[in-house]
Amino acid sequence: MGSLIRHPDILAAAQKELDSIIGRSRLVSEFDLNNVPLLQAIIKETFRLHPPVPLLIPHTASEACENADVDLKGTHFELIPFGAGRRICVGLRLGLRMTTLLLASLVHGFDWALPDGLTPESLNMDTEFGLTLERSVPLVARPIPRLAHDAYAM
Ligand code: HEM
């Protein structure tokens, strides 16, 4: 969400993609996730730029690359946010589904406003090492509903 708020044009494009298959009268569901190539590319790019597990840092990309056709399930070594080989993450499918559904829900369901004085460009994207890679400064943003009122009832 931080990266998307920092790039409002990409956030708008992702919302447009979600609107085009879901509309604005219901929430996104798991069944929609195979039809959102832009959102999937955003997730891949975020895993590339901010690999969630710091021990994989030695495997981050050293130069810019096109990653649209790169799989992130451990067979393409250009992008291995879940590791690879015999010790690959056992929660890969659950983690990937949940990450995609959560991001799709936040992007489709809301516009995002930053606190007074903060601009998208000035958002601090620094990260810190811990058990997992975390933002140095927590993201604070205000969600503004953008779907039909009834869509949020469930
Ligand atoms: C976005 C979500 C997740 C990411 C990015 C992630 C990432 C990783 C990574 C990088 C590893 C190390 C793999 C290696 O050593 O090559 C790992 C291992 C592991 N993950 Fe995940 N994971 C996620 C979600 C989950 C979930 C939801 C579960 C359980 C339900 C899970 C359970 C495990 C376990 C048990 C291991 C150890 C596997 C082993 O050493 O044999 N992970 N994960």
Image (cartoon, grey):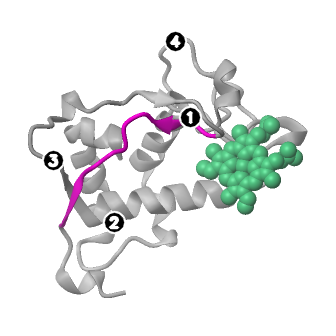
Residue that carries the numbered disc 4 in the rendered image: 63
| Residue 47 in view of the camera | yes
Residue that carries the numbered disc 3 in the rendered image: 115
Q: Quadrant of residue 117?
A: top left
Residue that carries the numbered disc 1 in the rendered image: 69
* Mark 4: secondary structure: loop
The CA distance from mark 4 to mark 1 is 17 Å
Tally of numbered tags: 4
* Mark 1: secondary structure: loop
* The C terminus - image quarter: bottom left
Residue that carries the numbered disc 2 in the rendered image: 21
Asked if the stretch drawn in magenta spans residue 138, the answer is yes
Q: Is residue 58 above or below residue 127?
A: above
- Residue 93 left/right relative to 86: left
Q: Residue drawn 9% across and 44% down?
A: 116
Disc number lying in front (3 or 1) = 3
**Which x, y percent locates residue 25?**
24, 79
